């Protein structure tokens, strides 16, 4: 009986070696170890053996069964590894390889239109004495809301659909920043007036997307703080920047706008450059595009930044970078910007 068991294992092993497909192997295993398999027959016949024999054959049969299971498991693992390696080999990309186009000339990448515009605007602001700051994408409630005069019960929180991170206790603490205004307080804390800075970057909102809305988009925050800063300064700087960006005088209008972190607050609109003011999907048929919310920094926000509002004041603005890119290049749908479609992206090479 012992020899028979050894023989079963030996045959099972050599049979297994000839197989290379997962379904065949699984069938082979269930045939061998199933009810009608030789091993099961032996286990069934244990009752007919003497006590002595049973003590030897029983454990041995179980040991062999276990070994067969293990042989199958390692065979399957081996096949899986082989398949992965095969796939890796087939899909291998040589990232050092140079790409040539149909006419056999060398191709190389370029900057995304949003990066191009961002760099250009940074240069304009740097030339006007602004610093360029950066801040974290994952923010806390304090910097995104509290410090900007938006306490937890403030209805203005509903203006921004926020992606919150889940916490174990269910309390909302961390979020993906909904605006670059988060950098206002961080920037103020590290500086003494007078100062001026901009902070460009990605922002995130849980919104339905359409031709002019995306869940991830770009803003460029700006802030200037000092003594006797006025709305006149704000308008002067904004008009100068827009003229530089569009390389021509751009028609603008100021409307009152509400933002808890500025008082008074404004909406600066520009005449739609896609349709010239006739009405299109970008300007929602109004002829005007909301480009620049802005205002005079609220005294509470200055205080949160450690600045005495009796002595200093300032202006702030939040430029919608993607809208600007669309205006500049005549793009009529914001979703193109994140499409990663090379036919679109390769039109903007900076060379
Ligand atoms: N953070 C605002 C938003 O995303 C935009 C904004 C409005 C920024 C007014 C400002 C400002 O600095 O003064 O909707």
Image (spheres, rainbow, N blue to C red):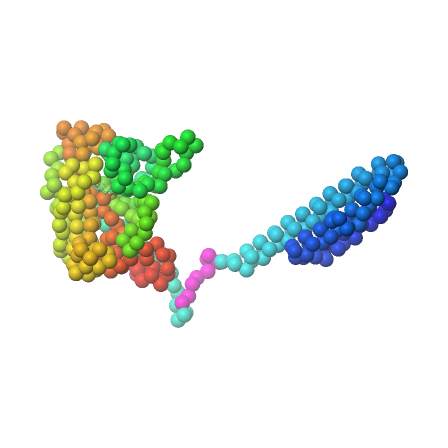
Q: Nearer the viewer, residue 192 or 323?
A: 323
Up the image or down, 193 lies above or below 90; here it is above
Asked whether residue 71 is in view, the answer is yes
Q: Which residues are magenta?
A: 94-101
Up the image or down, 4 lies above or below 330; here it is above
Q: Position of residue 122 (x, y in %)?
A: 24, 48
- Tally the numbered discs: 0
Instruction: Identify which residue is drawn at 17% across, 46% down.
Output: 267
Image-quadrant location for residue 23: bottom right
- Apparent side of residue 19 relative to residue 157 in the rendered image (left or right): right
Instruction: Identify which residue is drawn at 84% across, 48% down.
Output: 4
Instruction: Identify which residue is drawn at 36% across, 34% down.
Output: 172
Q: Please identify the dominant SS of the magenta region.
A: loop
Up the image or down, 92 lies above or below 219; here it is below
Q: Position of residue 261 (x, y in %)?
A: 21, 36
Image region (quadrant) for ligand 1: top left
Q: Nearer the viewer, residue 278 or 111?
A: 278
Instruction: Identify which residue is drawn at 70% across, 57% down.
Output: 19
Magenta stretch encompasses residue 56? no
Quadrant occupied by the N terminus: top right
Asked whether residue 225 is in view, the answer is no
Q: Position of residue 179 (x, y in %)?
A: 28, 42
Given the current orientation, which residue lies at the most extreme bottom position? 103
Image-quadrant location for residue 310: top left
Image-quadrant location for residue 340: bottom left
Quadrant occupied by the C terminus: bottom left
Q: Position of residue 187 (x, y in %)?
A: 26, 36
């Amino acid at each position: 009986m012992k020899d028979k068991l050894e023989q079963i294992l030996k045959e099972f092993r050599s049979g297994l070696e000839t197989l290379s497909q997962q379904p065949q192997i699984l069938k082979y295993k269930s045939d061998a170890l199933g009810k009608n398999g030789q091993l099961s027959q032996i286990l069934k016949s244990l009752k007919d053996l003497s006590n002595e024999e049973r003590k030897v054959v029983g454990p041995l049969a179980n040991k062999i069964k276990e070994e067969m299971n293990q042989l199958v498991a390692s065979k399957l693992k081996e096949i899986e590894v082989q398949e992965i390696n095969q796939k890796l080999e087939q899909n291998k990309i040589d990232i050092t390889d140079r790409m040539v186009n149909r006419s056999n000339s060398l191709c190389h990448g370029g900057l995304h239109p949003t990066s191009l515009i961002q760099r250009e605007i940074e240069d304009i602001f740097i030339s006007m004495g602004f610093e360029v700051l950066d801040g974290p994408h994952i923010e806390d409630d304090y910097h995104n809301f509290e410090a900007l005069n938006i306490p937890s019960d403030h209805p203005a929180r509903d203006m921004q659909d926020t992606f919150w991170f889940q916490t174990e206790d269910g309390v909302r603490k961390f979020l993906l920043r909904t605006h670059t205004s988060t950098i206002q307080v961080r920037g103020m804390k590290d500086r003494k007036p007078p100062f001026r800075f901009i902070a460009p970057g990605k922002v995130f909102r849980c919104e339905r997307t359409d031709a002019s809305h995306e869940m991830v988009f770009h803003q460029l925050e700006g802030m200037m703080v000092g003594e006797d800063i006025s709305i006149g300064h704000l308008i002067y700087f904004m008009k100068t920047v827009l003229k530089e960006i569009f390389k021509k005088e751009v028609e603008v209008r100021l409307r009152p706008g509400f933002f808890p972190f500025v008082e008074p607050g404004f909406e600066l609109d520009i005449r739609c450059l896609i349709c010239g003011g006739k009405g299109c999907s970008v300007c929602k048929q109004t002829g005007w595009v909301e480009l620049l919310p802005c205002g005079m920094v609220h005294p509470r926000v200055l205080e949160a930044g450690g600045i005495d509002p009796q002595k200093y004041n300032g202006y702030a603005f939040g430029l919608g970078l993607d809208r600007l890119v669309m205006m500049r290049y005549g793009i009529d749908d914001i979703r193109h910007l994140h499409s990663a479609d090379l036919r679109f992206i390769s039109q903007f090479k900076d060379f």
